[in-house]
Amino acid sequence: MRDVTVQAPASKSMSHRALIAAALAPGESLVSGLLDSQDIRRTRACLAACGATFEERAGGLAVRGLPDGPRGGTADSPADMNVGESGTTCRLLAGVLAAGKGFFRVHGEGRMHDRPIGEVFRALAGQNVSVRYERKEGYPPLVLGTDGLPGGALSISLEESSQYLSGLLLAAPLAKAPCLLGVIGSKVVSWPYVALTLQAMEDFGVPAEIELLTNGAWIPAAHGRPVSAEPGKIRFQVRPGTYRARSYAVEGDWSNASYFLAAGALGPNAVRVAGLRPDSLQGDRAILDILARMGARVSWDGGAALVAPAEGGLRGADLDMGQCPDLVPTVAVAASMARGATTIRNVAHLRIKESDRLAALATEITRAGGGAELLSDGIRVTPGALASGREVSFLTYGDHRMAMSLSLYALGGIRSVLDNPGCVAKSFPGFFGQWEPVVAAAREVGRD
């Protein structure tokens, strides 16, 4: 038995945010360590269509930003914003584009035209923003027209995504007057993703202030402190400001590291993942805590996260994963190879991702021999007699996270055949190149 070491890819969430912040900063920034994926290339292409320029250099990507915000086209010839299948690109840029001037046509591919965006424009009512939906009210494709944001009070519901708030936060410094952003609805803020946005804004010179309603008074809160903020009890104050160009290094991605860390928990080899920050604000850092709760041995070794197989195998757990929904496919597949049932809650919005991830997981876990029951807000996974030693053809639904998570079945002795392995290019084009040594090491142990 031997440890396997892999390098974590760059954070997708921070790559999006760093690109946007750099593109909004007058002057030239050098962004290093960007993730090279389809989603990030979509964000870059949209920013280029707004007037930002990019140049590949030995030390990273040189970004020359926009001195006056995003520049659109005319009503007859709007700037083309093809977000592809990147929901993050669409939701973050919806707010950012509204802070520019001109007309922008926002559209996409795959399921993008079935993914809602209307809440952003409801929040922007009274902010000199017009929107014309071409097919279905509240969904792309749409044409956005704007003369810049005057600022003032705005409120946003996060029932569908915290990225709505992140897009408005990124846009707020470009407004003519201070913005006061409040949260309405019933869904608690998905704090880790908002914290990453606030971190990027502060890093590029336009910090926001956070206040929590406590005993009837608004009390300042720290960006990095995990909070469970109820609607009506949190607000953000952002003053007009100018993003500042700088050199910026993107940290490693906990979401994409999760497949390798789960492989270490499933065995037979421990897996060491380098390039991750122990103090990261990424919500998906929770994978270490989740695997530890399920019995895996978790530690830090030489600056790398190390996960070793659980003694006697993983055990089931009851998990609220509302703060780390991108980990659900990883954990659900691992849970089907555990002892005892695992219940995953507070992730109903996974039904409107690149696929209906909850239904897709239930189908594919059952195909592998496990059991799965859909809940109103999650999924319950029970282990079963897996098809070990056999070949199983899995559907990926064109969803990158499904493809990478289903690959974990190789650790359970299943020869996985994916219908569309290439869909991993959306977030992690090099996944299979890094995954094969993990599987090969497990096969070597099996032959010993």
Image: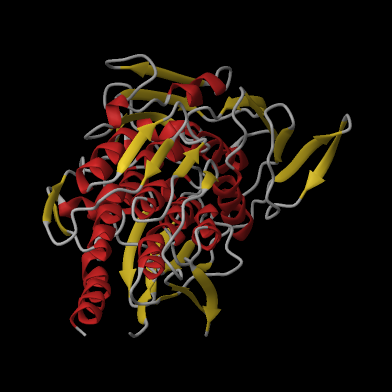
In the image, is 236 to the left or to the right of 242?
A: right
In the image, is 34 to the left or to the right of 82?
A: right
Q: Is residue 62 above or below residue 138?
A: below
Image coords of residue 421 (percent x, y): 16, 54
**Picture residue at 22% right of the left edge, 35% below the top:** 109
Comparing 130 with 302, the one in front is 302
Q: How many marks?
A: 0
Comparing 223 with 132, the one in front is 223
**Picture residue at 59% right of the left edge, 26% below the top:** 156
Colour convention of the picture: secondary structure
Q: Is residue 178 above or below residue 313?
A: above
Image coords of residue 138 (percent x, y): 39, 18
Specify whether residue 186 is in view: yes
Comparing 244 with 2, the one in front is 2
Q: Quadrant of the N terminus?
A: bottom left
Image coords of residue 54 (percent x, y): 34, 59
Q: Is residue 136 above or below residue 268?
A: above
**Which quarter of the picture shows residue 36?**
bottom left
Image coords of residue 353 (percent x, y): 35, 36
**Which quarter of the picture shows residue 180?**
top right
In the image, is 108 to the left or to the right of 272?
A: left
Q: Is residue 46 above or below residue 248?
A: above
**Picture residue at 33% right of the left edge, 77% below the top:** 58
